[in-house]
Amino acid sequence: MKANNRVSAMLVLMVVLLISIFMAWQYYSSSVPSIKVGILHSLTGPMATREKPLVDALQLAIEEANATGGINGQKIEPVIVDCRSEPLYCGQQAEYLITEAKVKALFGCWTSACRQAVKPVVERHQGLLFYSVQYEGMEQSPNIIYTGATPNQQVAPVVHWALETLDKRDKSNKHVYLVGSDYIFPRVTNLLIKDLLAAQGATVVGERYIPLGSSEVVELVADILQKRPGMILNTLESDSAVAFFRELNRVGITPEKTPVLSFSIAEVDLAGKDTVRMEGHYAAWNYFQSIQTPQNQAFLQRFHNRYGQKMVVDDPMEASYISLQLWVQAAHEAGSAEPSQVKRTILRQSLLAPEGVVSLDSATRHLWRVARIGKARADGQFDIVWDSGRPFEPSPFPTYRTREDWGHLIKAIEGTGL
């Protein structure tokens, strides 16, 4: 009887001890402050359809990091703001996130105008911005990590491939038409493209821009019909691109006759839209959802488990996802999420991403990435028809002009109000 009493007493003591440990753990967990990060994207306005999916990718990366303990036991808390597709307002929101919300890092921006509005804010406060969209280059900041492609990782190799592969005309008579949305990235990118085309003996027969988000493409396509190019290099964005391909199809310009190679069209742009109108044309990125690697398939499974099977993933989404992962790795190594500490370790980071191994370049603060070209399918996905086979070193400033000369050219373009 006494033995039974002793056993019962021990069991009660163990239960009380376990309850005490659990309550102490709960108290500790609730008392440990979270680490705030700012998500700085447009949820309204013409850029919302492109930027909302990047928020989803960042939230997934945050949830996964928190599931494994966050950063040194501290959970990561996203503070999401709406940039409203207005660059100046985005700069104001960056100021709020750093000075009032007290975030430790910013993840966001799509257009170069947005990034350039945020750049002086993070530099003034010694903050840290992760920018995950391909862009025109010509920039480096000690307060920005660039995980999107530079022109030498997307534009240059693809233009060479296009001239060798897509132009069905006489190789000595390459006629190319340039079309883009009317803002910094397309204009500077086309400046680079014209240099590349001239070096390879090609001729630009037309160059036109339409306002960001506009669907007024009839005059543009009529000019293409008149100029009869061998190929079209396209930097139109989102709804403008959809309207453009619809009009090409209406007038009988097909990929067999005049292939279009796009630098801003991705899976998200094709999802839920009339994808057959883009079937057979090409896009240039570093990541496609159709990459057949175990890492990418596992990533897609996690993404679909979180957001549903119909959700598609594209390059800027994957770059956003790995931006958060790189920041977490750097904070772990630094033992702190403070920007001054993360800056000491971030440039040493690399990881096995869904697209393959990516590494930050310590000299430029950009990622080494593989270049890829995809051919659009009827289901809105891309068949990868070419890749560089190895990651390209980022080169934000092409070396055939001085940085000073590039600066003058960029200022001239920015002076037009773009």
Image (cartoon, rainbow, N blue to C red):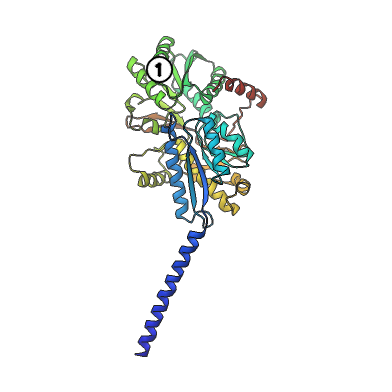
Find residue 361 and report its horizontal and vertical position in percent: 60, 40
Which residue: 47% across, 55% down?
A: 68
Horizontally, is 171 left or right of 141 in the view? left
Residue 38 or 261: which is nearer the viewer? 38
Which residue: 36% across, 33% down?
A: 381
Which residue: 41% across, 45% down?
A: 299
Which residue: 38% across, 17% down?
A: 257
Horizontally, is 245 left or right of 117 in the view? left
Find residue 231 and report its horizontal and vertical position in percent: 44, 18
Find residue 43 and report its horizontal and vertical position in percent: 43, 35
Find residue 16 and report its horizontal and vertical position in percent: 42, 74
Residue 415 or 323: which is nearer the viewer? 415
Which part of the image, by quadrant, shows the N terminus?
bottom left
Q: Residue furthest bottom?
A: 1
Tell me which amino acid carries mark 1.
Answer: Val
- Does any portion of residue 391 appear in the rendered image? no
Residue 144 appears in which quarter of the rendering?
Answer: top right
